[in-house]
Amino acid sequence: MTRRRWIADSWDEATASLAGTQAAHLIRVLRAQPGMEFDLVAGGRVFHSVIAAIAGDEVRFNLIAELEADPALPVTLLISVFKFDRMEWAIEKAAELGAQGIVPVIARRTEKHLAQAAAGRAERWRRIAVEASQQSRRSDVLHIADPLPLKSAIREEELALRLVLAEQERSTTLRHALSEALAASGDEAPAIRIASGPEGGWTAEEEAMLDAENWKAVSLGPRILRAETATIAAMAVTASLLE
């Protein structure tokens, strides 16, 4: 029987604890009792664990044995902020597909009210990332960075393979660019960063800025995709080549 998996809020070498909403659900809904067994993610590792004690709104576990677990894929998605309900869906699916991180980006065509509200929304995005990572039985949690202006976001991780989804690009597909880079990298996949634009696409100024920072323009094909569709299609293509 597959044990339910939780993501620890705190841990050391032998024990770990759940607090907050995870602990509340375990205590009140699942009627947690000492001796119940679960899988627990702690520090990017997965452990077979047993409940040692319940104190107030905290559940403490003894870590019994480490389990084999696949790491996140070395992929960070730079997602230009778009309508929050659709963005939450994209974050959830990116976690399920194994992305390592997401950087919410404020682009020139990001709607003004969304750009202003993005920083306050980040904690909700992180909660969604935790829940999706837990549900998909990851050994880590999809990392959600604080929102950044595009100019700052595209300058991070200079050594990564940098790919930008561009509507005007037709000759180079994402799959082709990734396949070439992976073939050249040998046994160890490079860090990969994929930037996806807002509704309405990148401006000419942004395209020039991305080009100057060595971001390679790639295509997902001839069809125009919604922002959330493009993000998840790109992650799915990437995952198919890495796994």
Image (spheres, grey):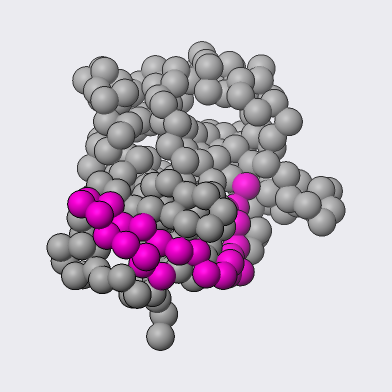
Tell me the residue at 62%/47% (across/down).
Answer: 74
In percent of width and height, residue 59 lies at 31, 57
Eyeballing the image, is 199 above or below 64? above
Eyeballing the image, is 23 above or below 243? above
Closest to the observer: 133 or 4?
4
Where does the N terminus fall, quadrant-wise? bottom left
Q: Which is the main secondary structure of the residues drawn in magenta?
A: strand
Q: Is residue 52 visible?
A: yes
In percent of width and height, residue 88 lies at 30, 44
Eyeballing the image, is 40 above or below 35? above
| Outermost residue, bottom side | 1
19 relative position to 142: left or right: left
In percent of width and height, residue 164 lies at 57, 34
Tell me the residue at 38%/74% (across/down).
Answer: 37
Closest to the observer: 92 or 109?
92
Where does the C terminus fall, quadrant-wise? bottom right
Instruction: Report the magenta residues as a range.
Output: 50-74
Tell me the residue at 53%/58% (across/down).
Answer: 14
Quadrant hosting residue 26: bottom left
Question: Is residue 76 shown in magenta?
Answer: no
Question: Is residue 71 shown in magenta?
Answer: yes
In percent of width and height, residue 159 lies at 73, 31
